[in-house]
Image (tube, rainbow, N blue to C red):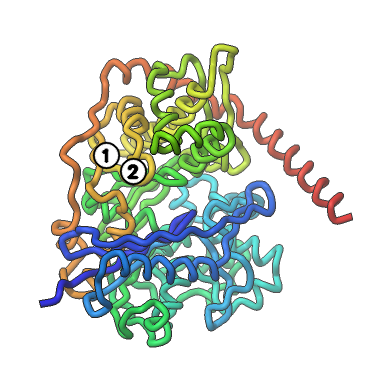
Amino acid sequence: MKKELVIGIDAGTESVRVGIYDLYGKQVGLGITGYPTYHPEPGWAEQDPNEWWAALVDSIKKAMNQSGSTKDQIIGLSLDTTCATIVPCKNDGTPLRRALLWMDIRSHEEAQFISSTGDDALKYNGYGNVSPEWMVCKALWLKRNEPQNYESADKILDFSDWYTYRLTGRCTGSVSTTTYRWHYNQEEGGIPKHFYEAIGIGDIFEKLPKDICKLGEHIGGLTQEIADELGLNEGTPVAQGGVDALNGIIGLGVTQPGKIALVTGSSHNVYGLTTKPIHAKEILGSFPDAVIPGLRLVEAGQSSSGSTIKWFRTNFCKDLEAIANVKNVSVYDLLNREASIIPPGSEGLIVLDYWQGNRSPHVDPNVRGLISGLSLKHGRAHIYRAVLEAVAYGTDYNIRNFRNNGIDTSEVYAAGGATNSKLFLQIHADVSNIVINVPEDNQVACLGSAILASVAGRAYKNIEEAVANMVRFKKERIEPNKENHEKYQLYAEQYRKAYPQFHNWMWENTRINQSESINIQNEILV
C-alpha cells in the first residue's frame, strides 16, 4: 500500500519553501529556493513573479528528490504566500510589472487619503489609519501613478491567487487574503463596493477574482502543462491557500479562542481567535472566517523584526563570518553568546524597531528606526540585544492591547525565525511574563499548507481534524523569569512613551530624506 503524502508550499519574503509531509505531520522532504527583493526607492519593495515561479518549480523538485517520494503518492497540495503583495497581470497570468511586495509603503499618500474618508470599512483598521501595505492603497497608487499598467491589467491578484491561477487555470480569491487585506466581509455582502467607489477604484471589480473560496477548499487540479513542469500528476488536488502567517496559525494548532499565535520572520505578527466581533483602536480586525469558519481573527504586527536583525548582522558583523565558519556555527549564535551576558535593558539602550515604519499599534509608515541612550560604554552586543528587546517590547505592546480588549491568554504558540534563538524567545517571555510553546516542526506555514492539502485530498474532513493529527509541540517550554520581567517593565514603558514624544520629529526627518532622494534621482537622470 502506498504511503500518502501532501505538499505544503510557503512563499515568504525571501524564498519559497516546499515541505512534503505524511498524514501525521512528519516532514519527509524540504526544498528551499530564494529570490531577490528590489528596492528602487526608500520604502519601496518589489519582486518579480517570474522569479517566484522559477523558485517554486525548483523547490518542489528539490523536496521530491530529498523525500524519495513519487508523484503517485501526492494526494494534494496547497500554499501560502506573503499577503498584500499585488500582481497586475494579463488573462494568461503574464505580469505587467514587478509585484508590489507586502512591505512596500510607497502608497502612504493614498493611505492617508483613504484613512480620511471615515468609511465604515475602516473598522477593520481599528478605526484608525490604513497602512500603505494594504491592497486598496497599492491598487489606488497603481491607478494614480501607473495608469497604463492599471488599465491594461486584466486581473489584479494577490500573490497566492496568482500562484493558484498558474497551477489550476482557475482564478479564485482566498477568503483568507481578501478578508485580511481587501476589506472583504462575506457576512456583509463581500467587497464593500461603496468604499471602493468612494476612494476611486470602483472600476477594479472586473479585475478581481469572482469566486472567493475558504481555506482547504478543493479549487481544482493541476493542469497537464503545469503538472509536467513540476513533475507531478495532472489533476493533483489543489486546496485554496492564503496568507503565510495565517496558514502558520493553522500549523501552530491555534484553531480556537484562548491561544495566541506569534508568527515571526521578516516581520512579527500576533494573532488571536474570537467568537465575537471586535473592532478597536490599535487592533486589526476582527476578520470573519479568515482562518476557521465561524471564528474571527484579530491581529497586530511589526513591519520589520527579523529583517532589522538581518540588517544589523549584514552591516555590522562581517568580522564574525570567518569565526562562524571556523567554529561551524551561525553568526547569530555568536551574537547571541555576546548578548546573553548583557543585562536586561542593555544598560540603558532603547531602540524603536521602525526600520520599515510601524504597523501596530500606530499604523505609521513615516517613522523610522531609532537608537537612544548610546554611550562610549556600549558595544555591538549591547546594540544587538537592544534590537531584540525592542522587538519584544513591540510585541508586548500588542499583547497588552489584546488583553485590554478581552483577548487574554497566559501562553503563546510561536514559530518562525525567532524560535531559532533561545535568547530571543526568553526575552519575549520575560518582557511579557508569558509562557512560550514551540512546535516540533518550525516550518509551520508549510505544515499549515500541508494540512489544507490533506483536507482537499480527503484524508481529513476538516482543518480541526487534520490539526489534531498533524501538529506537535516540543516538551520544553520557555518559562518567564520573574526577576527579569520586573526589570523590563521600566524599559518597556520607556519604549511605549517614545512614539508620542518623537514621531513628529521622525516624520520631519523622513520627509527631508524623501526630498533629498528625489533630488539625487533627478540629478542622476540629468
Q: Residue at x 57, y 32 (%)?
A: 316
Please say whether residue 82 is visible from this viewpoint: no
State left or right for residue 181 relative to residue 103. Answer: left
State left or right for residue 340 relative to residue 257. Answer: right
User: Relative to 36, does residue 392 appear above or below in the rendering?
Assistant: above
* x and y, in percent, of residue 89 in the image: 57, 75
* x and y, in percent, of residue 252 in the image: 26, 50
Q: Residue at x 18, y 35 (%)?
A: 476
Whether pointer 2 and pointer 1 mark residues with C-beta atoms closer than 8 Å, the reply is yes
What label sits on residue 412 in the rendered view? 1
Quarter occupied by the N terminus: bottom left
User: Relative to 128, does residue 469 appear above or below in the rendering?
Assistant: below
Q: Going by the picture, which residue comes out furthest to the left?
A: 1
User: Relative to 516, does residue 59 appear above or below in the rendering?
Assistant: below
**Kind of residue at disc 2:** Leu
Q: Which residue is mark 2?
A: 262
Dividing the picture into quarters, in which one does residue 408 lie? Answer: top left
Dividing the picture into quarters, in which one does residue 397 lie? Answer: top left
Circle 1: element type: strand
* x and y, in percent, of residue 309 in the image: 49, 37
- Quick one: label 1, few (<14), some, or many (20+) residues within 10 Å? many
**Kind of residue at disc 1:** Val
State left or right for residue 118 relative to residue 108. Answer: left
Please say whether residue 249 is visible from this viewpoint: yes
In the foreground, 516 or 285: 516
Quarter occupied by the C terminus: bottom right
What label sits on residue 217 in the rendered view? none
